[in-house]
Amino acid sequence: MTTEVSTHLVMTVEEAAERLGIGRTLMYALVKSEAIESVCIGRLRRIPEDALVAFVQSLRVRHPGDAT
């Protein structure tokens, strides 16, 4: 397992899953549900780096009524 950080603006679904520490299947499900933004470049599906940051930030947002 390497800890090399990508310098690309976009990454493959597999690379994005690795960055989040989740499986490929879950990552595809998050993309399909539009929980994580993705873009098409030609026939390729890619995940912008800032989409991962936005996703993690959305998980940290407390919703009214949540336990403290």
Image: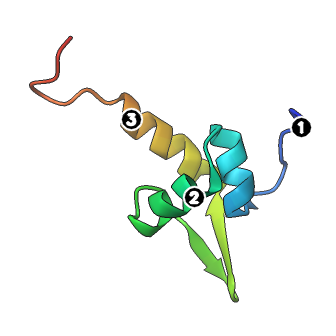
Are the two marked residues, 1 and 2, in contact with CB atoms closer than 8 angstroms? no
Residue kind at label 3, given as amino acid type: Leu
Mark toward the start of the polypeptide (3 vs 2): 2
State the residue at coordinates (55%, 67%): 38
Quick one: label 3, few (<14), some, or many (20+) residues within 10 Å?
few
State the residue at coordinates (21%, 11%): 68
Q: Position of residue 11 (x, y in %)?
A: 73, 60
Residue most toward the top?
A: 68
Residue 26, compared with residue 4, is above or below; it is below
Residue kind at label 1, given as amino acid type: Glu
In this rendering, position of residue 62 left or right of residue 37: left
27 or 46, nearer to the observer: 27
Are the two marked residues, 3 and 1, in contact with CB atoms closer than 8 angstroms? no
Quick one: label 2, few (<14), some, or many (20+) residues within 10 Å?
few
Residue kind at label 2, given as amino acid type: Thr
Q: Secondary structure at mark 3?
A: helix
Whole-angstrom CA distance, mark 1 to mark 2, is: 22 Å
Q: Nearer the viewer, mark 1 or mark 2?
A: 2
In this rendering, position of residue 6 left or right of residue 42: right
| Residue named by callout 2 | 25
